Image (cartoon, coloured by chain):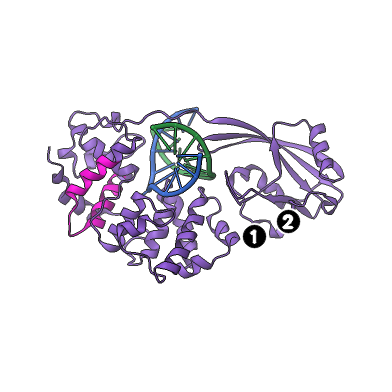
Chain colours: A purple, B green, C blue
DNA sequence: AAGTCGGGGGA
DNA sequence: TCCCCAGACTT
């Protein structure tokens, strides 16, 4: 099989069928950069509203470099993988200091920036600057594996490098960006990961070995990942009739730097929950058990139990970490991750 | 090479 | 439920 056969049919198909996306065909490398960071492990539909808001608030590299951390996290709230935006800001500062505020235009320089790995460097270099370099993401791994009927484990980095080589060798000089995007677009809408591949609509099915041997649903091969660990937690909605207590998470680790409802390890009985609140120097008046909730991260599962506790006054606490937010403030200032979604609504409700 | 880091949509 | 998404960084 000659892999090169896919190039022209694929590019033509892409140009005739590509989706209209807010960051596409904009001739603005900063937009390409922002979109590629947001799209890391994140679906197009999820990114759309975040992208629009982000470039409106931070229209250029300069404004990104100077944005306060709280505002930055608020713009990313709910999108996940929060280090992406911190890394992007660090890179923006590097661009400002070392590249005269202009995003560098070659693959190697892009690769040296924080948060830009081999995929993203290839995507920006090819899409925004027309450089002839591959951009191999999960879509491309799947598409190329199926075309070549490869049963190698795509979770191995050696396999990714091999596929980068294969793509490099067939990359057209006249439209590297369109070709890379065509491979990804095909993977996103035709050669799909979940469910049946739409081979009847595929412009390169004629040369696809997996399709010829009816094995598209067996490829790609990927090593199984280990099971998630479970974590029992007790969440506290502590209110004094005016405000609700929240706190800032540590600067490193899971949900770093975001805000949360106070919560601790283990499932506590209501007596122990009251004891905990008293240890904070608070005077509980009333306790209500809330429905349990679950939140699934990539590698951890939180099984949450929760109590809503009314106290006489939050101001008596010994705990310097606690922040008191009113119903009106709650949504505007502090980035609270979706993991607390089941309980966040109580912040805006009156205690009884 | 393996572990960490979010959240949601679709089968 | 499970899978995976226009992945990168740390250990």
What is the chain letter for disc 1? A
Q: Is residue A315 left or right of residue A145?
A: right
> Quick one: A293 or A301, which is closer to the camera?
A301
Instruction: Tell me where residue A275 sits by quadrant.
Output: top right
Disc 1 residue crowd, few under 14, some 14–19, many 20+, Cα 10 Å? some
Residue name at image x 31 percent, y 62 percent: A128
Mark 1 → mark 2, Cα distance in angstroms: 9 Å
Residue name at image x 39 percent, y 64 percent: A30
Point out residue A90 in the picture as x, y percentages from the top left corner.
Answer: 49, 60
Q: Which portion, as a residue range, is magenta?
A: A161-187
What is the chain letter for disc 2? A
> Quick one: C3 or A318, which is closer to the camera?
A318
Circle 2 sits in a helix, a strand or a loop, which is it? Answer: strand
Give the mark, 1 or 2, whose residue is nearer the N terminus: 2
In the rendered view of the protein, which quadrant contains the N terminus of chain A? top left
Label 1 and label 2 in one chain = yes
Point out residue A178 in the picture as x, y percentages from the top left corner.
Answer: 25, 56
Q: Is residue A240 visible from the viewing direction of this image?
A: yes
Q: Is residue A175 magenta?
A: yes
Mark seen at residue A333:
1
Instruction: Tell me where residue A155 sits by quadrant.
Output: top left
Secondary structure that dominates the magenta span: helix
Q: Which residue is mark 2?
A: A325
Circle 1 sits in a helix, a strand or a loop, which is it? Answer: helix
Q: Are marks 1 and 2 in contact (CB under 8 Å)?
A: yes
Residue name at image x 64 percent, y 48 percent: A249
Residue name at image x 56 percent, y 56 percent: A73
Name the outermost residue toward the bottom: A100
Point out residue A8 in the picture as x, y percentages from the top left corner.
Answer: 15, 51
Point out residue A131 in the picture as x, y percentages from the top left corner.
Answer: 25, 59
> Quick one: A340 or A250, which is closer to the camera?
A250
Q: Is residue A19 visible from the viewing direction of this image?
A: no
């Amino acid at each position: 099989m000659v892999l090169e056969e896919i190039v022209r049919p694929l590019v033509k198909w892409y140009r005739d069928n590509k989706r209209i996306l807010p960051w596409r065909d904009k001739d603005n490398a900063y937009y390409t950069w922002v979109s590629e960071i947001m799209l890391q492990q994140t679906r197009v539909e999820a990114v759309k509203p975040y992208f629009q808001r982000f470039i409106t608030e931070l229209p250029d590299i300069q404004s990104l470099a100077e944005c306060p951390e709280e505002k930055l996290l608020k713009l990313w709230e709910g999108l996940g993988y929060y280090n992406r935006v911190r890394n992007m800001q660090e890179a923006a500062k590097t661009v400002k200091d070392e590249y005269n505020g202009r995003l560098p235009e070659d693959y190697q320089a892009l690769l040296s920036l924080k948060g830009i790995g081999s995929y993203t460097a290839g995507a920006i270099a090819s899409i925004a600057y027309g450089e002839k370099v591959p951009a191999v993401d999960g879509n491309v791994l799947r598409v190329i594996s199926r075309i070549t009927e490869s049963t190698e484990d795509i979770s191995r980095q050696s396999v990714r490098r091999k596929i980068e080589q294969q793509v490099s060798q067939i990359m057209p000089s006249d439209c590297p960006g369109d070709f890379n995007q065509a491979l990804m677009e095909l993977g996103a809408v035709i050669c799909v990961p979940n469910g049946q591949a739409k081979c009847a609509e595929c412009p390169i099915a004629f040369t696809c070995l997996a399709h010829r041997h009816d094995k598209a649903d067996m490829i790609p091969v990927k090593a199984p990942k280990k099971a998630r660990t479970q974590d029992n937690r007790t969440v506290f909605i502590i209110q004094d009739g005016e405000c609700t207590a929240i706190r800032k998470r540590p600067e490193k680790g899971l949900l770093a730097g975001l805000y949360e409802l106070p919560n601790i390890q283990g499932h506590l009985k209501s007596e122990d929950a009251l004891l905990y609140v008293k240890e904070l120097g608070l005077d509980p008046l009333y306790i209500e058990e809330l429905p349990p909730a679950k939140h699934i991260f990539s590698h951890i599962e939180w099984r949450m139990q929760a109590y809503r506790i009314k106290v006489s006054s939050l101001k008596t606490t010994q705990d310097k970490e606690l922040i008191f937010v009113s119903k009106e403030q709650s949504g505007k200032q502090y980035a609270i991750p979706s993991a607390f979604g089941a309980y966040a609504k109580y912040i805006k409700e009156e205690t009884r």
